[in-house]
Amino acid sequence: MDVASQKKIDIKLETFEGPLDLLLQLIERDKLPITEVAIARVTEQYLKVLRETEGGMHPEVLADFLVVAAKLLLYKSRALFPHLNVAETEGESLEEQLKLYKRFVDASRVIEKLFHKRQYSFAREHLGGRAEGVFAPPIHLKTDRMHTIMLQVLKSLEPVVKVPKTVIKQMFSLRDTIRRIEQLLANQVQMQFGALLNGAQNRTEIVVTFLALLELVKQRTVVVKQEGMFEEMTVMKMTNDQTPMTNQ
Amino acid sequence: MSLISQLESFLFISNRPLTVRRLAELVGTGEEAVEAALADLREKTNGEERGVQLVSVGNAYQFATRGEYAKLIAAFVKEELVGEMTRPQLETLTIIAYRGPVAKSELERIRGVNCSLILRNLMIRGLVETVDGQDDAHDPMARLLVRYQVTHDFVRFLGLTSVEQLPEYEQLSKHEFLEAMKQQGEKFSNAVISE
Amino acid sequence: MSLISQLESFLFISNRPLTVRRLAELVGTGEEAVEAALADLREKTNGEERGVQLVSVGNAYQFATRGEYAKLIAAFVKEELVGEMTRPQLETLTIIAYRGPVAKSELERIRGVNCSLILRNLMIRGLVETVDGQDDAHDPMARLLVRYQVTHDFVRFLGLTSVEQLPEYEQLSKHEFLEAMKQQGEKFSNAVISE
């Protein structure tokens, strides 16, 4: 990342609503058009903001940020590992997604303007015709039916009240993963990428691990080696003089 | 902005007949001009194709549906007001019975949907009332504090003397999920205020 | 008795939107005839300088006052105009307005972020509602997907008579790329379910 863009990270961290919003803000702040190149350019800043805010994020929201992070890394990894044949993920490209998102953001500004015009159109609150002093109970309603209804209401609240624990379980933060890799490396110096993924439960975790690995590469704490296009990647810890340590 | 169309919107939205004087006040013009415009409006609504007519009672005006539809309309109004109750209505009534007195905002958080219309209907049916006659407060802040409970008539209709006799009242009325929802709501409104 | 004038009288007297199906029941005629008559009624009402306009969302209709009289009417009914809306709410409402009825999954694909909480809040505010999937009875997958649309309240907040009046409605509601996304989404949810 060039120094100039690093200096510019002063985006208010509370003000973005989602990963696409953050990405769009970063791109627009740099007055870039929405292109793959521009998206790749703001990747570092995106990851930095994510690192700084992930702690306060709801797990489900964090997952959404990571999905976008994974896509960003796809772009990035093409540059980092040119010999690695990174396949397109399924779904639309980030560029297309962002362009579409921006159209709706623009449309929402128009709606906001309409809204502020306060041209509220009123409908009748009361039914025409008189109807006062009636008592019209639901004829067949009995207390046991009310009991059943109340139990159903309470049951429907369960998913709202209880933060989905499975999601929390599935997710672990980027920071934790980075630490995990660092610890593994401290013991083993050199290891296969596959081993890092041994603990990964699902795609999201694989993505997170990969993401963390790239972070370490960037911070020059590790080096990743791959012998052939489809070979296992090897992760090596850097020594202080910045040459990879080996077991020899 | 034409005078006629302004008058039409006031007459449409009003629950009651409006006098010429009141209308003149509302649109900020002289009574004569209003009278002339009303005559125009009346003529316009008298056509065959219109389902609503402008009628006058003394010096007051109001829109009314065409006389020939009276029966149909009466049946519709009755059905809307006191027809068989829908599931959302029964659900709202039940929550108010177990949880009352309960604020509209809490009720809405529990149900996850806006309850204005249903509450109004339950009140018209004499099943639900506001506590301390806080009914229809126009001050939005005061309206937030309005609490709803079921009426004595409804409790009696169920064959009870108090809502506490509802099955499992103790456990259900203070159920942890309901308490949690309430706290979420308080957190939420605090957050909104502090923004 | 003309069909148009009958429809006008029901819509005038009602305090909530009426669907084509309900209106057809009320007037005792086929839904197609009702739809045609409503189109007529709409043209007649909204085309002229009337004080009321016919607002439609999906297949439900409601009369409401003209948007430009909002201030006058608000003072009369002593109701505050709408509270504020946050950016995420506006953004979500925009997508639902243009794309409704829309499944949560599609909404989230466009915004790129989980929308459960915001949808819930918008429903509590009465700005968004779910659509019954009854019409898709042949497709069990579609029935599983709850879809959302903006309410009459929302359309009236903007002083419009239909979401189709929103700028660029044609393009944004039928964006070809969105169609492609939708298909991918369906493939994806099929895959998830079959796992």
Image (cartoon, coloured by chain):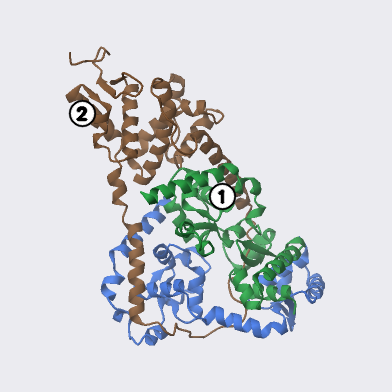
Chain colours: A brown, B blue, C green
User: Residue C61's x, y, as percent?
Assistant: 63, 66
Q: Is residue A146 left or right of residue C111?
A: left
User: Residue C131's x, y, as percent?
Assistant: 52, 61
Q: Residues within 10 Å of mark 1 (few under 14, many from 20)?
A: many
Q: Residues within 10 Å of mark 2 (few under 14, many from 20)?
A: few
Q: Is residue C23 above or below residue C132?
A: below
Tell me, yes or no, whether the two marked residues, 1 and 2, touch with CB atoms within 8 Å: no
Residue on which the image places disc 2: A183
Identity of the amino acid at label 2?
Gln
**Quadrant holding the N terminus of chain B:** bottom right
**The numbered mark 1 sits on a residue in which chain?**
C
Which type of secondary structure does the marked residue at label 1 adopt? helix
User: Residue C134's x, y, as percent?
Assistant: 51, 65
Which type of secondary structure does the marked residue at label 2 adopt? helix
Residue C30: which quarter of the image?
bottom right
Q: Are marks 1 and 2 on the same chain?
A: no
Look at 31% across and 63% down and name the residue there: B177
Q: Is residue A127 above or below residue A96?
A: below
Look at 28% across and 21% down and name the residue there: A222
- Residue C94: image tag: 1
Can residue B14 be seen by looking at this rendering? no
Identity of the amino acid at label 1?
Thr
- Residue A59: image tag: none
Can residue C31 be seen by looking at this rendering? yes
